[in-house]
Image (tube, grey):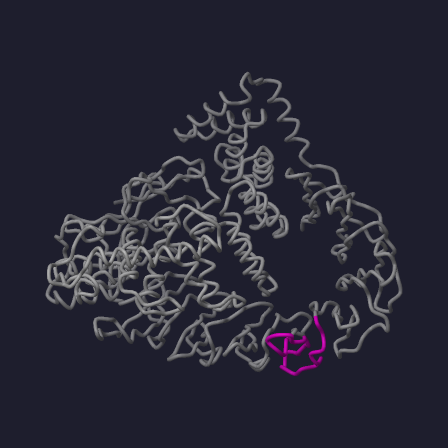
Amino acid sequence: MKPKPLFLVCTILICTTTLFAQEFTRFKLSHESKWGFKDAAGEVVVPPVYQVVGEFSEGLAPVGNPDERGTMRWGFVDVQGDTIVDFQYYFAGKFSEGLARVRGKNYEFGYINPDGKVIIDFQYQEAGDFKNGLAAVGNGGHLEKGQMVNIKWGYVNPENRLMIPHQFDAAYQFGDKNLAVVKKGKNWGMIDRNGATVIPFKYDPFFERANNTIIVSKNGKKGAYDFSGKSLVPVKYYEMHPYSDGLAAVKDKEKFGEWGFVDRRGKLVIKPTYKEVHPFSEGVAAVRSVVGWNFIDREGNPLFSKTFYMIGSFSEGLAPVMFNNNSHKTWHFIDKTGAPQLEINGYISVEPFQNGLARVGKNVGNRDIRYGFIDRSGSEVIPPVYTGATYLSDGTFRVYQGTRFMILGPDGTPNRKAAIAANEKILKEHPSKDEGATEYQKGREAFNLKNFHEAFKQWRIAALHDHAEAAYGVGILYHNGKGSPLNYAESEYWYLKAAELGHPKAMFNAGIILLSGNNGPKDEAGAMEWFKKAGEAGENIAYIKLAQMHLNRPSGKKDIEAAVRYYQKAGNADAYFALAGLISDGTWNTVPAKEAANYYVRAADMGHAHAAYTYGMMKYNGSNGVPKSEAGAHYYFVKAAKSNHSGATYMLAQYYEKGIYVGKNEKEAEALYKKAASWGHPEATAWVNTKYPQQQTFTSSAQPLDWSFSKTPNAGSGFNEADHNWKLNNELRNYKNYLDTKFGKTKSIW
């Protein structure tokens, strides 16, 4: 089918499924298992009629339903829910750079364009999305014990020209500087677009790129290369920060270690003797030893004989310092001779100068800090009366008063005068008898009819009468240029107005905008404040975003404690699953590894399918401190399979095929294998293709499975249902008691 012209209704900044900003949110009705999509206003744009859905990308989303034989078939729909690519594929990924990977009837991957035309024929056993003009594709594998192994990966361009031959055991997309992380054997390295090795294959899958440097890791120790592949620092340090002014901070021990600096030749030019360090700036770095803060030069020589109580980096020739024993109220900006050039009083915090301005903070009582800016004479350009203040690259300021913000011009005066005058005129011409409720409803009706100009008109009237939902809607329309000119500054204003009126999603959206930098430089501190407010107002996704930000800080130094705290505040299935992952991969290493199981089961109890599957595998294998229990594993596999988890469905097929815990039932096993295969499970697909080698497709005629425990397996299997239920419930009850103690009593499936 020919695609219709795409008419984006609006852009949503909330996504409850991927936890990142997206255009649309997938949803399903509580009493059904079918999925659809809602837009930013909560309106259904794609009805919940699909068993599986992907994510919208480039105006289309992959969706799937079983055909008459029970085999999952995928196609693509647009933002109005119209089918653009017919349901004919066994799997479909998202569109990226104008192409989407799809699996054809021979279970091989190819690529199509948005018209549904096959651009790259079906010929690959595995395939990835295009990025920077290349896609990773795999071939050459073979079945071994029902599993596809030894696939070799290479890269093709959109014309299907093999640009890098099949030679890797794993391959990722090309990213910064056109480098890609790939695997050979058990080790990882990086290649360029010609396939040439840039980083040799001898590292763990950890590659941090920053400031023209690639930090690598092996067995818990770190080193660095430049982007040409030149080794800069040998892999021997327990921590390493990106280079600044040609030097990088390194830590010599995992615990209780001290910091020093290496140059770009890897030479340790400053021995590890410091408890804390700042990056080098203007040839010097702020460091803290056991006696206090000081500055050192590039040879490690201290600049001054005395130390400081508080300190900031040098910038524009000056650094803010607070001397010891001075009541901690007076700051000085000193030059590199130590001579004070400027004395300022009354501020609790002073930051380095940037563009001739320094942000200052004043304590106005009860730890309530207000921010403003001073110039190099110490005069207040922006008085410290705002709860937040940021200098933008265009010479303006973003300042906050409570939760409302405005943009100030270089002279410190608001530059929204025209908008304010227009709004005052609207208020006079359109008084409201019900605080904007009537106008809001008129706007909603217009929005549903895609009459965005009328929706914008009505919602702005309602918003000016302090209707929170209307203010949020005006922000959405400004953000997308629907019914109004595209204007991120006005969008921010209306989101923040809605937030001030108590709209939690508007608070979250305000944070997303500040983080995106659409209306100036990124303001991570401001974004964090809004995410905190959104979380406190009940928008738990904001806590998850805060946790992610603390795990992906620009400095590269993760704040694990803060991330854990925010995940725990979120308190939902995704958060507990993330906590389990942090323990499992060693990131959260201050708790026993076996604690991961408790978070997995917590997430599973709240409906997280992959958590249920993961915990089921732990019980099946008796791993991660979880007692081995085939019965308990079966319980969690069932929970996950109910949510269409292919791995859990495959494991249940194994149960019925081998008679594990349940009686052997070949018909049931086959139905489960086919179901798992239809969802793309590789081992299940291999099982089906092995059993039916002459068939290009497989079918499933089995009746819907009865997942209840009341179904007794075949007679003679040795199964005792009453005994099984008692053992399982007792086992689960023990876990519930533990979790109630750890997290407090909650609603439970037990």
Please indicate whether residue 626 sits to the left or right of residue 108 in the image.
right
Question: Residue 500: where, in percent of width, then height?
Answer: 60, 35
Please indicate whether residue 507 sits to the left or right of residue 707 in the image.
right
Residue 260 counted in the magenta span: yes
Nearer to me, 331 or 150: 331
Please indicate whether residue 441 sits to the left or right of residue 279 in the image.
left
Please indicate whether residue 81 sits to the left or right of residue 333 in the image.
left
The span shown in magenta is 250-275
Question: Residue 315: where, in percent of width, then height?
Answer: 76, 62
- Residue found at x 54% / y 25%: 462
Question: Residue 678: where, in percent of width, then height?
Answer: 22, 57
- Residue found at x 69% / y 43%: 399
Query: Is residue 81 shown above or below 659?
Result: above
Residue 604 counted in the magenta span: no
Nearer to me, 390 or 738: 738
Q: In which quarter of the view is residue 195 placed?
A: bottom left
Question: Residue 638: where, in percent of width, then height?
Answer: 27, 55
Query: Is residue 506 shown above or below 468?
Result: below
Q: Number of labelled discs?
A: 0
Nearer to me, 714 or 410: 714
Q: Quadrant of the N terminus?
A: top left
